[in-house]
Amino acid sequence: MDARPSPSPAPDHPYLAEIEMERERWEELIGLCRSLNLEERLAPGYYRDPDWSVKDMVAHIGTWLAEAEIQLFRIAAGTYVEEELDVDALNDQFLNALRDHPWDVCWNQLLAARSQMIGAWTKLSVRTAAADAWVHKSGAAHYAEHLPRLREWVAELHGEVVAR
């Protein structure tokens, strides 16, 4: 087992549907990653220019989850300050922060960050525009941006024909 189970939200949680969708997409994401051996996880080609591996994608998602946790706690505490985000610059910063780390570090960071983010998310008692934005940036919608390419890449690595 990779991590403790995520906290369950109350049945009337304002983000119940989004939390359930996050869990569904999370299970697919980690299942696809687990289907690869270490060499496949480190192989460049998940993205090109710059080259990303599945490890880079894992690091990318994990760092956004970690950032979302911080912001969701700030929202819950009433200390959140809305700022314009340079998503491309943050993506570069996050990728560079973990690029030279081994798979296990990136994987464990992803698992821990997701657990922490879900913990922060389940503590929210009301919906806000700021929370909606961070849920979108880090949860199911973010996974959905990566799942199509991850499915294709896993199929390519396993020598399956990919229909386009």
Image (cartoon, rainbow, N blue to C red):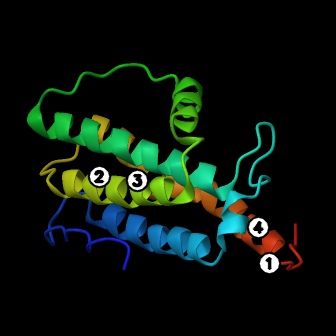
Query: Looking at the figure, which quarter contains the C terminus?
Result: bottom right
Identify the amino acid type marked 2. Met
Q: Residues within 10 Å of mark 1 (few under 14, many from 20)?
A: few
Callout 3 secondary element: helix
Looking at the image, is 98 positioned above or below residue 40? above
Can you tell which mark lies on residue 158? 1
The residue under the point 43% across, 56% down is 110
Q: CA distance from mark 1 to mark 2?
A: 32 Å
Asked whether the beta carbons under mark 1 and mark 4 sit within 8 Å of each other, the answer is no
Q: Residues within 10 Å of mark 4 (few under 14, many from 20)?
A: some
Which mark is first along the chain, 2 or 1? Answer: 2
Callout 4 secondary element: helix
Q: CA distance from mark 1 to mark 4?
A: 10 Å
Q: CA distance from mark 4 to mark 2?
A: 27 Å
Can you tell which mark lies on residue 152? 4
Which mark is first along the chain, 3 or 2? Answer: 3
Q: Position of residue 94 (x, y in %)?
A: 51, 35
Q: CA distance from mark 3 to mark 4?
A: 24 Å
Which mark is first along the chain, 3 or 1? Answer: 3
